[in-house]
Amino acid sequence: QKEVEQDPGPLSVPEGAIVSLNCTYSNSAFQYFMWYRQYSRKGPELLMYTYSSGNKEDGRFTAQVDKSSKYISLFIRDSQPSDSATYLCAMGSGGSNYKLTFGKGTLLTVNP
Amino acid sequence: SQTIHQWPATLVQPVGSPLSLECTVEGTSNPNLYWYRQAAGRGLQLLFYSVGIGQISSEVPQNLSASRPQDRQFILSSKKLLLSDSGFYLCAWRRPGESPLHFGNGTRLTVT
């Protein structure tokens, strides 16, 4: 079983839709979680960082973490064509572990 | 604020030629530094990371090496490039501890 599973998509939605992106993980040592947005030919950009279970909101973006189910989500409200990108989840286990584990990314297209 | 610079943005090199990609971080001290390679459909592959000057950890044995000659400078090198070294190379930094990664804009390397 892979440590992190992320549906690669592609996911295509109309402008204004609510988008739900998800990752599941198997390593219960993961303690903190991130979502990145990556435009074509650019580096990943940090969108959300969260440490605890529950919801964290930032503008149109909401990150949700359920540690008991080993499941994280990113919701995008009122999606815009500029949201079209690849979204990567990432997680870390803390302590002396310097490495993060990434999902392979979900390609999202928002159609005007 | 912190910024990360990575150059060049694109590079075309013949097989057998040397490689040097440079990354510098501004606005922070003693960062953890990382080199990743991203191939289409294969996600982010961690190549090297460094927790201090001269301290390099290699994740994948291959044709590449890394060095950290200064606190905020990270260099990826090869003595002789292979076709299989083509890819999108990303430098990243993070504060020590349980903090997110911040990526540069990447170098697209094509080995011909």
Image (spheres, rainbow, N blue to C red):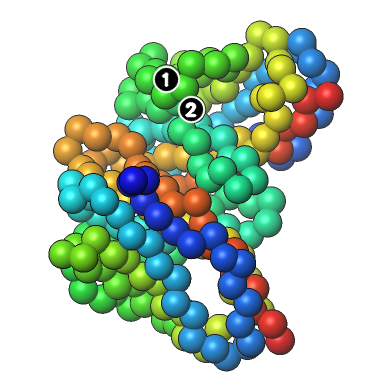
Three-letter residue code for mark 2: Leu
Up/down of B27 relative to B14, above or below? below
- Find residue A24 and report its horizontal and vertical position in percent: 33, 60
Residue at left offset 70%, top offset 10%:
B80
Residue contact at pointers 2 and 1, CB within 8 angstroms: yes
Instruction: Give the left or right position of residue A55, taking residue B76 as reference.
Output: left
Taking depth in this image into account, of B41 and A83 the one nearest to the observer is B41
Total count of labels? 2
Question: What residue is rendered at 26% in x and 76% in y?
Answer: A55
The kind of residue tagged 1 is Ser
Q: Which mark is residue A39?
A: none
Question: Residue B65: image x %, image y %?
Answer: 53, 15
| Residue hosting label 1 | B58
Of B73 and A26, the residue lying toward us: A26
Q: Return the residue at label 2.
A: B47
Q: Is residue A9 visible?
A: yes
